[in-house]
Image (cartoon, rainbow, N blue to C red):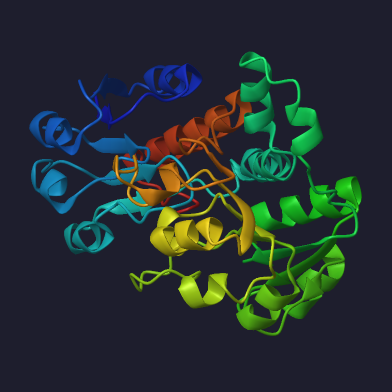
Amino acid sequence: MSLCFITQQIHPDAETYLNNAGIRTRYATAPTMEAVIREVGDADAVITRDLGFSAEALDAAPNLKIISCHGSGTNRIAKAAAAARGVLVTNAPNTNSRSVAEMTIGLLLAVVRRLCEADLAVREGNWEFRYTGKGMELHTRTLGLVGFGAIARHVAQIAGQGLGMRVMAWSPSVPADVFEGAGVMRANSLDDLLVASDVLSLHRPAQGSGRPTIDASALFRLKQGAILINTSRGGEVDGPALAEALEAGHLGGAGLDVMSPEPPLPDDPLLRAPNVVLTPHIGATTEQALRRMAMMCASQVQDALAGRVPPHCL
């Protein structure tokens, strides 16, 4: 009987699916790469979440045929080492797009209406906060989307149709007709997007350059009082530069579901910057998205172990 090793908890329906298909499942005893390397052993398949799967883990799994990534991003998987071994790597695209889009809008509302500060004020007996905690109305404001994949398109629909925002996006790889079909203005360059945006929201996969897309220069190209939202990858924003822009009052606020590193170090300046809402990478953490991701992973594991090429093989 084949064995699927799972690095972190997944939806139980996916485990049941695998077991019913005659595939045993075993979890790592701890969500660390050290535990994975120690325990992966004779596994034929791996399902991994944000822990990824290192080259050392590959070396420890001589029978491995597939690494199935629980999400769309595979930047923490040793893909070159897997390719050299002939081990398939799959992802689960678009399974969490709506959930991450809704999280993006939630962060934006939390920032512009200062919801976390307001909640704390009530708990501390400071009802006077209502006279000092001015917010921003989003109707007619310009939302700039960096990237225009599935998540960004959901964000555009919610923000445009639901909040009445003016939506622009920049993505060099997306054809013009996609923007037209979504009713979204296409920015010719990142700089054009920056100078036009009241709110900037990031939705590009990691670019692999090691340099943030939104660096200090980009941050100060944004309008005075602009809001930055990141539900993409923490490394896409220069964290210290963002903290500086917030401290200087150039930006009006930020909402971050991702940081670099994760979890943040205790001295990360963003932990003390003003008007920042921070969440621990929970954009995809809804019951519906978690089930969709896990079931796609399980289905692709079954395909690979049956000798079929999975549909989302990278």
Q: Is residue 21 above or below residue 96?
A: above
Q: Is residue 178 above or below residue 280?
A: below
Quarter occupied by the N terminus: top left
Q: Residue at x 46, y 56 (%)?
A: 243
The image shows a total of numbered marks equal to: 0
Image quarter for residue 120? Answer: top right
Q: Is residue 61 left or right of residue 299?
A: left
Residue 155 at x, y percent in the picture: 73, 51
Q: Is residue 222 left or right of residue 187?
A: left
Q: Residue at x 52, y 43 (%)?
A: 257
Quarter occupied by the C terminus: bottom left
Residue 300 at x, y percent in the picture: 43, 41
Q: Is residue 70 left or right of residue 122?
A: left
Q: Is residue 278 left or right of residue 55?
A: right
Residue situated in front as seen by the camera: 268 or 258: 268
Residue 23 at x, y percent in the picture: 32, 24
Q: Residue at x 51, y 31 (%)?
A: 295
The answer, for residue 313, to whether it is visible in the render is no
Q: Residue at x 34, y 43 (%)?
A: 264
The answer, for residue 214, to whether it is visible in the render is yes
Image quarter for residue 140? Answer: bottom right
Residue 174 at x, y percent in the picture: 66, 74
